[in-house]
């Protein structure tokens, strides 16, 4: 994971200090690219412990077309909880519940979860339930799988998360989640049977989000390659605004003092793409440094 550590160093050394939406402040660089060769191992950061279980559950949640955090909190995955909690706190229904009490109500009260657990038109909706002009829904993942199988030379093997109408709904504050950070990803099939994927990410939280993003999209690349009888090769991660929050600097400097370990392997069961469940994935040989606590900026 030298590529990730190089990104951290680059932003620490060259980042421009900026104010940001959260009020935390960042060091920011615009335009950067990393390339990971999946034939060398599964690119899960080893200089700190990364929450692989949460990454896998989140990806499967996206692929179900779900946008409500109840699926995640029922599985004790809390990576999206802060956004709907902040929206709830701003409402007339807020009764001074803590975040933990809010999560418990999401788990135990279906009506509460339906009203306050939905994030709005985020990844699951855009990937799986993109609205079409005829009132139906477009499954972009299903479509791109069919294109890879039937027209592998295409330069249109794209999945977009940037639905302008829905983004306006998120920007307006009607929904709790921010506009989608992972804007678009594209596949490439090589003549010798390899599959590559490039992600364009408009905004990237380097300490917390980026290690998740690297692993999640690499895993998706592996799943698609398996379904299409191809060999997963390069995950290319292209950034717009790559930033380090000012309260993450010391933790990242600590991470840079650690020596990367050998990459683990990810094994996926021999099942169809849409049949894969959590138990069908096995992370093998993951050795890592101790966790480093980074506070999320909402």
Image (cartoon, grey):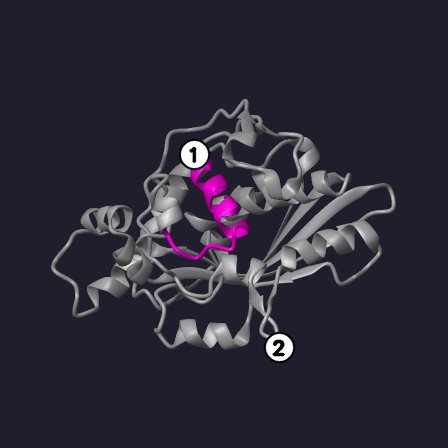
178 displayed left or right of 285: left
Q: Quadrant of the N terminus?
A: top right
Measured Cα–Cα span from mark 2 to mark 1: 46 Å
Q: Name the element at disc 2.
A: loop
Q: Residue at x 60, y 39 (%)?
A: 275
- Classify 10 Å Cα crowding around label 1: few (below 14), some (14-19), many (20 and above): many
* Residue 114 point in image, percent of width and height: 32, 59
Q: Nearer the viewer, residue 36 or 62?
A: 62
Q: Residue at x 51, y 45 (%)?
A: 60
Residue 255 x %, y %: 42, 37
What segment is highlighted magenta in the picture? 52-69
Q: In the figure, 112 relative to 78: above or below?
A: below
Q: Say which quadrant the C terminus sits in.
A: bottom left
Residue 59 in view: yes
- Residue 34 at what x, y percent from top left? 62, 49
In-front residue for pair 147/256:
147
Write down the residue under mark 2.
133
Circle 2 or circle 1, nearest the eye:
2
- Closer to us: 114 or 191: 114
Q: Are marks 2 and 1 in contact (CB under 8 Å)?
A: no
Overall secondary structure of the magenta section: helix
Horizontally, is 47 left or right of 25 in the view? right
**Residue 53 lies in the magenta-colored region:** yes
Q: Secondary structure at mark 1?
A: loop
Which residue does the numbered mark 1 point to in the structure image?
Answer: 48
Among the two numbered marks 2 and 1 on one chain, the one whose residue lies closer to the N terminus: 1
Left or right: 44, with 256 as reference point? right
Identify the residue at horizontal 37%, vertical 52% (top origin).
Answer: 69
Q: Position of residue 263 (x, y in %)?
A: 58, 29
> Furthest-left residue in view?
95
Instruction: Indicate yes or no whether the magenta region holds residue 287.
Output: no
Q: Which mark is residue 103?
A: none
């Amino acid at each position: 994971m030298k590529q990730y550590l190089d990104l951290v160093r680059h932003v620490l050394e060259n980042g421009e200090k900026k104010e940001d939406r959260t009020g935390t402040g960042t060091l920011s660089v615009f335009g950067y690219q990393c390339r990971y060769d999946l034939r060398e191992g599964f690119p899960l950061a080893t200089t700190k412990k990364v929450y692989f279980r949460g990454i896998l559950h989140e990806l499967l949640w996206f692929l179900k077309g779900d946008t409500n955090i109840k699926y995640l909190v029922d599985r004790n995955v809390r990576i999206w909880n802060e956004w709907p909690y902040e929206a709830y706190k701003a409402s007339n229904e807020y009764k001074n519940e803590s975040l933990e009490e809010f999560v418990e109500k999401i788990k135990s009260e279906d009506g509460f979860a339906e009203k306050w657990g939905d994030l709005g038109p985020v990844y699951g909706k855009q990937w799986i339930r993109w609205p079409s002009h005829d009132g139906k829904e477009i499954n972009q993942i299903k479509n791109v799988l069919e294109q890879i199988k039937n027209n592998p030379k295409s330069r249109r093997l794209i999945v977009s998360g940037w639905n302008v109408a829905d983004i306006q709904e998120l920007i307006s504050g009607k929904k709790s989640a921010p506009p989608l950070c992972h804007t678009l990803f594209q596949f490439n099939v090589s003549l010798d049977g390899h599959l590559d994927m490039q992600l364009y990410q408009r905004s990237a939280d380097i300490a917390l989000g980026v290690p998740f993003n690297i692993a999640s999209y690499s895993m998706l690349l592996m799943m698609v390659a398996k379904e299409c009888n191809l060999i997963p090769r390069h995950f290319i991660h292209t950034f717009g605004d790559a930033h380090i929050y000012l309260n993450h600097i010391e933790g990242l400097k600590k991470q840079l003092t650690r020596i990367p370990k050998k990459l683990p392997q990810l094994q996926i069961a021999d099942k169809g793409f849409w049949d894969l469940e959590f138990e069908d994935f096995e992370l093998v040989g993951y050795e890592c440094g101790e966790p480093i606590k980074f506070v999320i900026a909402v």
